[in-house]
Image: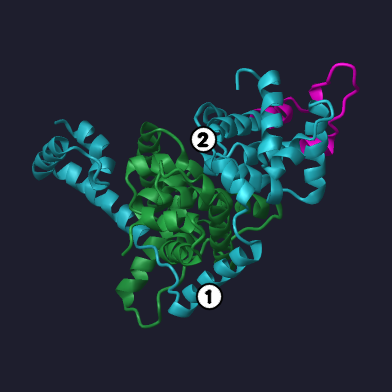
Amino acid sequence: MEGEDRLVERALNGEEGAFEELVKQYQAPLYYLALRFVRDEQAAADLTQTTFLRVFQGLGGFRQRSSLKTWLYRITINLCKNYLRDRAKKGYENSGEIDPPSHANPLQELIKHEDQRRILKAWEQLPERQQLTVTLKIQEGMKYHEIAEVLKCSVGAVKANFHHACKNLKAILQEGRDEMS
Amino acid sequence: MKCHRVQQFLPDYIGDELSAQKRQQVDQHLTECPDCRATLRALHEVWDGLAQQSRPHKDEQFWKELTKGVMTEIKSKGPMHEDKKRAFLFPGWRVLLPATAAAIAIIVGVIAMRGGLWEPPGRGPWIVQGDQKVLDKAAPDLSFGPLAMEAEDQLEQEMTLQEVSLVAEALNTSFQPEEQMTITDVLTQQFNGEDLYGQLQGLTEGDLEELYQLLAAKYPYS
């Protein structure tokens, strides 16, 4: 596969095919990232599209000091935040549900689904900054320094957020267990 | 290594962020300590639960459509404007643009923070309640923060050119027409009739030069 730097360079030179290649490379991770936050498939697709539009319009200023990936993630997260803020103003509340297990799944799948739902609910109770850090670390598999680039903060702040998030998740889940027993 | 120390390291351990030496120390402790192993197991469960959150499967057609939608939209916008390209690539603007954007963000932030309390010399109060809401919205949008939660800190950091272009984009798209009018009015009044907002929207070298000079004179610290 062609190197990312070369692709960006070709896109900068106005090669449509190169930009399309970048879209193909990143559309799935950006779509799923947006979907995690907005929980609306159409909105996630729209936000992904807007991300690429902004990238296209801002590509001329991309200095490649940070990676294209962190830049794309940053734009998507910004757009998600704006979207959620606007949606909150309109009084929208999402159900917080995730896809149920497929009907072919055995009991174990059902238990797993229930565990995932519980964990997702706990994640939703985290402060926004911690939610983001956890998502980028655990679900996107980023290193602390990459998350720092995306969130424009220090590596220390990312680490502190992640540690707090782990501690909070543990406490929230424990609280839930105590309530059930 | 003591238990409480090991448990502090566990998020970094599981996230593969420890040095080889520390990792070895944690490994060593874990082989000997059932309590810490239990804590690690619990953390693994949460980690796996989040990592394996189901996401809807999308077929090839969906991705093709998404790509097509993006490319159609881009084509409708036309190629990147040559003036804009030159403005970004011209070395001098690498210094000027971030300063300009920082100044804009500072100005909007300051106006939003001071709101109706501020009164320009020789004029009556001109920020009405509705305007305040618009400015409150404008401030975080123009601070380009990932979540606008560290807006002030970020103003102190060097901004990248793509972020500057995002500011221009935000000015063009983030606000409703009436909101744009309010921002334009406020900035115009703040700068004694200079159409600051209009100038930034254009992003041409001449406008930016003029704007930068204006801002540099008014805000030498930026």
Residue B214 vs residue B149: left or right? right
Residue B175 placement (x, y as % from top left): 73, 48
Q: Chain B shown in which color? A: cyan
Circle 2 residues within 10 Å: few <14, some 14–19, many ≥20? few
Q: Is residue B37 above or below residue B215?
A: below
- Residue drawn 63% across the image and 31% down it: B100
Disc 2 + disc 1, Cβ < 8 Å: no
- Residue B31's tag is none
- Residue drawn 44% across the image and 44% down it: A150
- Residue drawn 70% across the image and 19% down it: B218
**Front-lying residue, B52 or A27:** A27
Residue B188 vs residue B60: left or right? right
Q: Which residue is mark 1?
A: B65
Q: Amino acid at mark 2?
A: Pro
User: In the image, is residue A166 part of the stretch drawn in magenta?
Assistant: no
Residue A36 placement (x, y as % from top left): 48, 59
Residue A100 placement (x, y as % from top left): 44, 72
Query: What is the span of residues highlighted in magenta in the rendered image?
Result: B106-134
Q: Quadrant of the N terminus of chain A?
A: bottom left
Q: Nearer the viewer, mark 2 or mark 1?
A: 2
User: In the image, is residue B112 part of the stretch drawn in magenta?
Assistant: yes
Q: Quadrant of the C terminus of chain A?
A: bottom left
Q: Amino acid at mark 1?
A: Glu
Q: Is residue B182 above or below residue A94?
A: above
